[in-house]
Amino acid sequence: MKVAVTGGTGFTGGHTLRKLIDAGHEPVTLVRSVEKLEQVIELHGLPSIAYVTGDVSDTEAVSRLMDGCDAAMHIAAVTGTQIRKIPSLKTTNIDGTRIVLEEAARRELDPIIYVSSQSTLHPPLEDHYMANGPLSDDPIGVYAQSKVEGERYARKLQDEGYPVVIVWPSGIVGPNDVGISIAASGIARLLNVPILPLPKTGGVLMHDVRDLATVLACCIEKSKGPRHFGVFGHFYNWEETRTLLMNTTGRKIRSLQLPDNLFLGMGHIGDLFDLLHLPFPLDYSTAQFMTSLRPGDDLHTRQEFNIEWRPLEESFFDTLQWLVQQGHLKSRKVPSLL
């Protein structure tokens, strides 16, 4: 199929272009920077990729992107939890999502894939996240709020019978990005502090970007109607996460367990630093998620596409190797690579 792809130059998008081509599809991507697309092509060893220059908030560019296409995949999103990102979050994650999905529906493309976020399902009704669970009534932070609004429109189209496929990723980790993903930069920050402050509750919920890209490529199937797939991956509590970091780096990780209220207080301090455009390793929304994340049930996705998530140890090791190669992390921080 000829597939219109937004966000093709991003972390998930670059890996997905590779998987789409490997599966015999013909992606056409919307780009703001041709130079960045060229970097993605070189990084992933791709052939020449057809593209349209523009932004998801540009209705004319989105229309040109979908000319002659059979299916659509909307990956593009502004990420981050900083309050100062509110304008771009609204433009891309809410308005842009409506424009892309509306145009795909108008053209009767099949399927129309929308990449949402596990944050729209938080907190889960039970002890774990499930695909197509109820949308959060009180999403944590500006990013989750924007994704809830975007997903609300995707669900509306599903209710109207359009072949919209919603995919819910959790934290995405892995190598090969022309920038540096939120998860990768978070890992680098964790390893650069002498003592790692951790909360008592919560943990990490993560999967490999290459597994997510595989699922997205597998979703390109015609005449399946509305569908739902969670890609939640692995849940590790904070002690398990510390052990994971020690095993993959080959060094001792010193940590300090803090009461949750103190950890959340550090997040408030981080928000103040952000308003002053000063660096701080934590913000309040991230602290809320870190203290309250739960496991996810994605058995349906794995069975549907006959896939098992690669071990998080492998994903972390590959991420660390890539961070060192790109100069984002000193090699002495990862003795296992020496």
Image (spheres, rainbow, N blue to C red):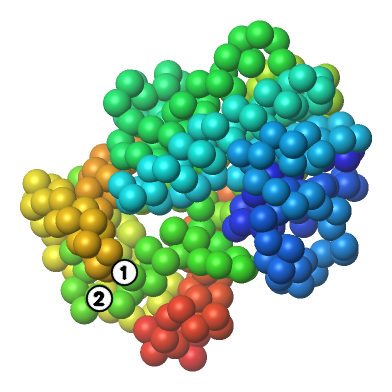
Decide which of 262, 141 is in the foreground and name it.
141
Q: Quadrant of the N terminus?
A: top right
Q: Is residue 76 above or below residue 255?
A: above
Residue drawn at 26 percent across, 40 percent down: 292
Residue drawn at 51 percent across, 53 percent down: 172
**For the residue marked with disc 1, what is the amino acid?**
Leu
Q: Is residue 5 above or below residue 278?
A: above
Q: Position of residue 145 (x, y in %)?
A: 38, 33
Residue drawn at 76 percent across, 72 percent down: 42
Q: Position of residue 9 (x, y in %)?
A: 67, 57
Q: Position of residue 293 (x, y in %)?
A: 32, 41
Left or right position of 218 against 129? right
Residue lying at the far top of the rendered structure? 160
Residue drawn at 60 percent across, 45 percent down: 76
Left or right position of 197 against 85? left
Left or right position of 188 against 323? left
- Callout 2–callout 1 Cβ contact below 8 Å: yes
Q: According to the image, label 1 marks what residue? A: 190
| SS class, disc 2 | loop
